[in-house]
Image: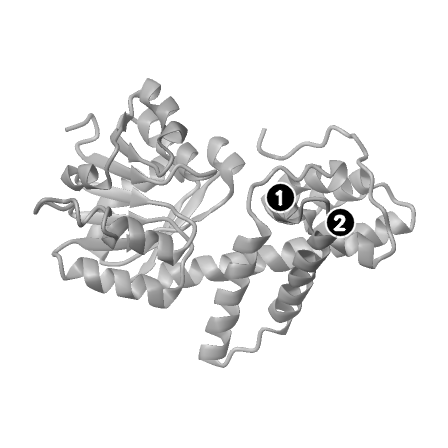
Amino acid sequence: MTTKGQTIGWIGMGRMGYAMAEWLLKAGYDVSIWNRTRAKAEPLAARGGKVVDRLGELAADDVVFSIVSTGKDLEEVYFGKDGLIAGANGKLPKIFVDCSTIGVEESADLRRRIGALGAAFVAAPVSGNGKAVKAGKLSSVISGDEAACRLVEPIINAYAPLGVAYVGEGELARICKIAHNVMLGVVIENLIEITLLVNKMGVPRHAFLAFLNNGVMGSMFTKYKSPALVNLDWTTTFTPELLRKDLDLGLHLGREMDVPMPVTAATREVLQSHFGAAMLQKNPEEYIQKDFAALAETMALAAGMKLTPENKNVPTGLE
């Protein structure tokens, strides 16, 4: 047992997962960690985390958290031949909490299969990137059995101190997260559009974005993407491929529910052009793994512009 009364298993040490698990360790939880590449988890051992070699070793924990890239990845770590459930030896966590962004149907299927084993499944996606996690600026939305959600809410609050919103049963949190990421795509596309427009007409990008961020249209998101757009720093926080996946998930829901989403559809097509433009780069595969804000270079190309870094110290709002 831990100072917090529950043992926790953690799956996934990507840009988000590492920092989220680190917050749980800081909060005093006993956390066992599995990652496909063990070396990525090793630094958390020095902070009190226990790094395990097999997913099945997490089966003895009270609650298991996961954050992976796709629904297929999630199914594999749960139900694959080397997955947690296959290696559980008859004992399972009482609650599975997943923080990934996956489709509604994928999530519902996993909920059904986990429920059949006598465990609860909580969908708990988050709002923010790795930098926001480190700065303590993360929030979360959760859905599932209310009793299970309330049990894990204090744990989630340790890495999502800006708030944990319970929205109801089933996959409602997945729907909220998909809608959130659709907005992310639309906003970055429009932010790039207007920044290129004023820049082409003579306004320095840093000056325009300072005006925008200090006014009513500024947000945490526009602030922390501003340094990238000013200095052309495409250090990855979220890839174009993952954004395209989420726009597709949103458009799928729109078609299912007969909700027109013309702005989302247009954004998706602009993003698709970025994959084509990547072929002009020396290493297309490497380039397309850069941050999704690199879309600015593709849109600048369409505008007949050649962007150069402004080399300005721009605050992120996460300081």
Q: Position of residue 300 (x, y in %)?
A: 80, 53
Residue occupying the far right of the picture? 202
- Which residue is identified by label 2? 297
Residue at x 17% of width, y 40% of height: 62
* Rendered image: mark on residue 268: none
Please name whichever residue, 154 or 301, is drawn nearer the observer in this view of the structure.
301
Residue type at mark 1 is: Glu
Q: Residues within 10 Å of mark 1 (few under 14, many from 20)?
A: few
Q: Is residue 219 visible?
A: no
Which mark identifies residue 286? 1
Residue 229 in the image: x percent, y percent?
Answer: 73, 42
Q: Quadrant of residue 173?
A: bottom left
User: Would you place residue 170 above or below residue 262 in this image?
Assistant: above
- Crowding around mark 2 (Cα neighbors within 10 Å: few <14, some 14 to 19, many 20+) is many
Give the amino acid type for the residue marked by disc 2 in the picture. Answer: Glu
Mark sitting earlier along the chain (1/2):
1
